[in-house]
Amino acid sequence: MGKMMRLDKFLVEMNRGSRSQIKEAAKKGRIAVNGAVEKKTERKIDPDTDQVTFDGSLVSYRAMEYYMLYKPQGVVSATEDRKHRTVIDLLDGENRNDLFPVGRLDIDTEGLLLLTNDGDLAHRLLAPNKHVDKRYYAKISGTLPLDSVRQMAEGMTLEDGTPVKPAVLEILSVPVTLEPTTSDSDAMSDEARLTEVILTIQEGKFHQVKRMFEVLGCQVEYLKRLSMGPLELDPELEPGEYRPLTGAELALLP
Ligand code: URA
């Protein structure tokens, strides 16, 4: 016997409406369990063996699934794409077309991406009024203005006029400036010219991190998402790898 669950919870998870809508529908006799009309939505069912119908059609059970993916560069955060590999193509098994990424990372961005078939969770994490923090590690070229931390903290306006919410900029390392007399500065590797930062933003506007650094006159050369809300990218994952969320992580989700 599988895990027992409340009839209303089952129908909410299977996207048949909110708990109160389901209660209403049940009162009207629209829900049946194993062929018998059921008006008590708090009763328990076994989703693996009980047959639940809504308006006469069978509601088949699909468990909610949640995966943490280390998105590599070069794949798109979409379920289908004509040109590029998608994050769904990285998953083993065939029947994974119910899963979708929660939010997007650019094709050249890597890092944490949550994949699920739970549309309500996606909504809770992405709704603009929810302000779920996203932390990014970036390597940038150009020279950061002295007041960059303050500019980011005050909430800036992107070049096209879009305002963004306050963000937290932490500068991890800046390029070492060599004396002009040493010829080594010419030999300085491209990598050594980059500034390493962590930026925490509250929204997920198109190319947001890249556009915020553009306002400061800099360019993002490498971008990796480290966390999203309570979820942190598992350091054990390599780019392209994924794993189910743990019970502890699931408990942290909104
Ligand atoms: N900001 C960006 O510019 N790109 C991303 O992929 C994510 C945030």
Image (cartoon, rainbow, N blue to C red):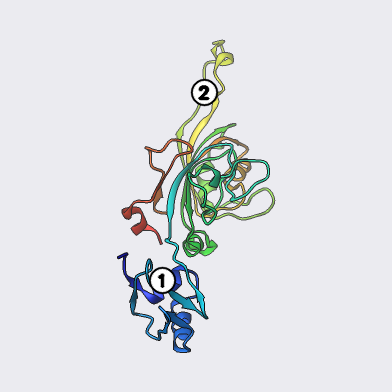
Q: Which element type, helix, strand or loop, lies under badge 2?
A: helix
Residue 89 in which image quadrant:
top right
Residue situated in front as seen by the camera: 111 or 64: 64
Residue 187 pos. (x, y %): 56, 14
60 w.r.t. 70: above or below: below
Q: Is mark 1 within 8 Å of ligand 1?
A: no
Q: Quadrant of the C terminus?
A: bottom left
Residue 33 pos. (x, y %): 41, 79
Q: Mark 1 — residue?
A: 10
How crowded pointer 2 is (Cα within 10 Å; few <14, some 14-19, many 20+) is rated as: some
Residue situated in front as seen by the camera: 68 or 139: 68
Q: Nearer the viewer, mark 1 or mark 2?
A: 1
Residue 110 pos. (x, y %): 52, 39
- Marking on residue 150: none
Please tell me which residue is depicted at 52% across the width and 42% down the height of the picture: 90
Please tell me which residue is depicted at 39% across the width and 72% down the height of the picture: 9
For residue 228, say whether it is visible. Answer: no
Q: Which residue, as the protein is rendered here, is positioned at the far bottom?
A: 28
Q: How many marks?
A: 2
160 w.r.t. 111: above or below: below
Disc 1 residue type (three-letter)? Phe
For residue 192, say whether it is visible. Answer: yes
Please tell me which residue is depicted at 59% across the width and 14% down the height of the picture: 186
Q: CA distance from mark 1 to mark 2?
A: 55 Å
Q: Is residue 53 left or right of residue 106?
A: left
144 w.r.t. 165: above or below: above
Q: Mark 2 — residue?
A: 192
Disc 2 residue type (three-letter)? Ala
